[in-house]
Image (cartoon, rainbow, N blue to C red):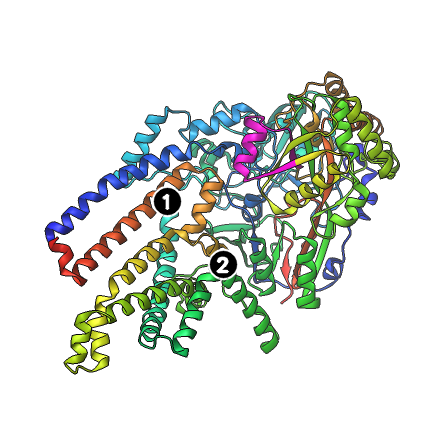
Amino acid sequence: MKFPSLKFAVPLAAGLALSFTMADTAQAQKIKRGGILNFVVGSKIPSYDGHIEGTFGMIHPIRPFYSTLIRVNPDNPQSPTDFICDLCEGGVPKGDDGFTKYVFKIRKNVKFHDGTPLTADDITATYKKIIFPPEGIASARKAFFKMVDSVESTGKYEVTFKLKFPSGSFIPSVAMPFNFVYSKKDLDEKGYTWHKTNINGTGAFRFVQHQPGSFVEGKRYENYHIKGKPYLDGFKAISAPKMALRLQAIRGDRAAIEFRGFPPKARDDLVKALGDKITVQESDWNCALYVTPNQRRKPFDDARVRKALSLALDRWGGSKYLSKIAIVKTVGGVVFPNHPLAATREELLKLTGYGTDVAANRKEAKRLLKEAGAENLKMVFNNRGVDQPYKVVGTWLIDQWKQIGVEAEQQVNPSPVFYAKLRKKSDFDVSIDFNCQSVVNPIADVTKFLGSAGNNYGGYKDEVLEKIYDRLLRAGTEKEQRVIMREFETRAISDQVHMIPTLWWYKINPHRSYVKGWKIAPSHYLNQALDQVWLDK
Amino acid sequence: MWQYILKRLFLMIPTLLGAAILIFFLLRLIPGDVCEIKLAGAGLYVDQEQIDICRKDLGLDKPMLVQFWNFFFGFLTFDLGKSMWTGKEITFELGLRFELSLQVAIMATLTAILIAIPLGTISAVKQNTWIDYFVRAFSIAGIAIPSFWLGIMIILGLLISTQALFGTPWMPPIEYVPIWEDPLANLSQLIWPAVATGYRYSAVATRMTRSALLEVLREDYIRTARAKGLMEKLIINRHALKNSMLPVVTVIGIEFAFLMGGLVVTEQVFNLNGLGKLFVESVLNQDFALTQALVMVVVSVFIFTNFVVDILYAWLDPRIRYA
C-alpha cells in the first residue's frame, strides 16, 4: 500500500538501497524450511513491553513473538511509504472523510499463542493503551498519535480510527514495530503492566525462554496467520554487548547475523576472512547525530555563534572520510535522505554550513564569531561514551571547530551521566544528541527540532518554528508538505541553527550467506518479525 | 578454635552494615536516572509524566531513609527485591550468573594452584639457575599481560588457527550451558577464560610461593633438618612448603573472591554471563537495586573467603588461634 500523500516515493526509494546483497537471488531459490537462526544482539532488554520501550535490545529478540496491525513491507523495506497489512486484511486503508477516518478490517484466522482468538477488541484495547493510557500507565509512543480522536471496534472484525485532523504521519505511526498487539483478555485480567515480564502475542514464533544477559529463545508458531510461514524452526537471540565479540561470533559461526550494524572495517575484515560465505547488505539509516548548543548559556544564545559552529563543518569531506571508519555517511538535512520530503543536494547547498567552499564557510564563521564577540571561543562538548559513531564523530567535530579557532574540550560520559547532563541538569555548553527512529515518518521525526518537544534539549522557544510545524502537521498534499518542510528546515538548521546536523548514519549488515529472506531496512528496528527468514543450509 | 570462629563470625555484621550504607548512598551520588535511560535512552520523546510513573513504580519517589530501610531489611531477610531494569527478581538474576562465575573462579583457581605451587617451589629450590630465570620471566609476563588481552588473543588465535588447519574458523561457544547438561560444551566455553585469568592469577601466586619459600628455606629449623640428614624432598614438602603457605593462601583467597565479581572485562571478551558483566550493566543502567544487591553479594563472598582464610591460617599456624 502506498500512502496517498507520498505516493511517488516508492520508485525513488527502491533505487536507493545500496546493497550487494543476494536477497533477490534468494527469492528465486527454493525456500528451505527448518533450522534455528542464531543472531547476536548488542543491547539489553529492559522489559518485554513494546509500548513502553524504545531500544533495539528489546525489538530484535521480542518482536518475532508479536504481530502489529500493519507493517513495513518486508519485501520492500527500503521504501519509506510501502506498508502492508499484518493483522488487518484487504490492504491498508487509504482514509475516508478527508483522511480523518481509517477503517481496518481484521483477519479472522488469528489466535494468540495461548489459544485466544483475535478480534477487533484486541486491536482497540491495544491502541487505547498506546494512545490513551490510563493514569499511571506509561506509553512511550502516545505523542505520535496526537492526531487521533478515537479508536473503536465497529464490528467483531473491524476497527475504526477517527482523527482530529488529516495527518501524513498517522499510517507510518501505526506501522511502528513497537505497537505489539496484546490480547484484551490479558489486559483486562492481568493488568496493563503484565506484558513487561510476560509474552503472549500472535507473532510467527512462540516464546520458549529468556535467560537475562544470555539469550532469548523462540520456536515456530504453527498457527501463525500467514500460511506457510515462518520458515525457521526457531531462533536464538544471543546477548553480546561487545562489538568485537559479535563480529567474531559471525566469523566463528556462533551467530549468523547481527541486525543493528557494523562499521566498515568490521565488514571488510569479515569479507576478507570468509569471502563468499559472507553477504553484505548496506543502507542509509534513519538515525542522525546532531550538535545541540545550550541556548540557556552565553554565547550559544546568539544565532551567529551557532551558525559559526555549523559553518565550520566540512560535511561533504567528512562524509568521504568518516564513512571509511564509522557508521555515518550521508549528508542530509532534517529529513531522512531517501524520503521524498528530504532536501535535494541543490536545496541542501543553500543551507548554512552545507556549501562546498569550505574555506569561504570558515572565513564567514570566523567573521560571525568576531561580530558576536566570541573569538577564541572555548567550550565543553558533552559526548556519549559509545564508540560508533559518537566518539568518532565527536573527534571529527573537535577538529572542525579548531579550524575556526574554537577550542572544544570533549567530555565523553557514560550514558547515565550523559543523559543527566543533557536532559535533567541541562549542564552543558554544546552536546551531541541523536534522533533515531523506526518507520521513516518525517512529519513526526522533525518534532525533535521544536524547542517545545520533550526530546529537545536546546533550551529555546521559537514560536515561528512552532507555527511552521503546525502548518506542516495539517498539510494535506505531499507538494504542500514538501514546501513547508523546506521552510521548517531553513528556519531550524540554517537561519536559527537551533541544532547542527552532522551526518546521517549508514547501516552495514554483513551476515552469513546462508541467511536468506531478510532485507535490510533503513532502521535497525524494522523488518524484525523474522517470518520471512530462511536458512540455505 | 570455636571461640576464634565465633569471634570472626560476629565481626562480619558491622562490615556488612558499613558496606550497605556506603553502597546505598554512594550510588545515589552518581548523576543519572534509571527511568531516563530506560525511556529516553533511544532518543524517544518522553514527557515528565512518564518519568514520574516509572520512578513511582520503582519506589524511587519514596524518602531516602525509607528506601535504605527497605533495601537493608530486604537483604537481612534474603528478599533482594526486583531489578529496576528488567523487573525480574534479583535472586533470579543473580542465580543465573552465580553458577557460571563460581565455576570460572574455581577453574581459574585450580589452574593457578596447579601452575603456581610447583613453579614457585622449583624456582625457589633452583634459585639463580636458568630454571629460576625462566619461571620468573614466565610469571612477570603473567602479571604484565592483562587477562582480557590474553583472552582476545586466545579467541583470535583459535579462529585463525582452526581456519588454517580445518578450513572453517572455530571459536568457543558464546552462551553458557551448565556442566551437567553438556560437559563438553561447558568446558569448551569456560576453559579459555579460566586459562586467561588463571595465568595472571598463577603469576602472582608463583612469585609469592617463591619468595615465601626462599625465606623459610633460610630458617634455622630447615638447617637443623638438613644437619640431621633428612632427605631434601622431605624437607621441602613436609617442613618448608607448609610453613611458606600462609601468604600464598592469602593471595589465593583474595584472588578467588575477586574473581567472583571482578572479571568485568574478561567476561565481556568471552561473552560470559557472569556477575562481573552484570555488575557493569547494572551500574550503566543505574539499576540501584541490582547494584546494591551485587555489592552485598560480593562483600559477602569476600567476608566469607577471608573467614575461610583465617580458619586456614589457624590450621596452618596454631600460634594464631591461641594469640
| Highlighted magenta segment, given as a residue range | A409-435
Query: Seen in the image, is A348 located left or right of residue A256?
Result: right
The vertical placement of B265 against A59, above or below, is below
Which residue is located at x 72 percent, y 50 percent?
A: A75
Image x and y of residue B31, in percent: 49, 32
Q: Amino acid at mark 2?
A: Phe
Q: Earlier in the sequence, mark 2 or mark 1?
A: 2
Q: Amino acid at mark 1?
A: Leu
The answer to whether residue B85 of the structure is visible from this angle is: yes
Image x and y of residue B282, in percent: 45, 42
Residue assigned mark 1? B294
The answer to whether residue A110 of the structure is visible from this angle is: no
Q: Chain of mark 2?
A: B
Q: Nearer the viewer, residue A40 or B323?
A: B323
Q: Nearer the viewer, residue B322 or B262?
A: B322
Which residue is located at x 69 percent, y 66 percent?
A: A272
Whole-number angstrom distance, CA of label 2 to CA of label 1: 22 Å
Query: Seen in the image, is B262 located left or right of residue A181?
Result: left
**Is A432 in the magenta?**
yes
Which residue is located at x 32 percent, y 59 percent?
A: B251
Residue B148's disc number: 2
The vertical placement of B134 against A300, above or below, is below
The vertical placement of B254 against A90, above or below, is below
The answer to whether marks 2 and 1 sit on the same chain is: yes
In which quadrant is the N terminus of chain B drawn? Answer: bottom left
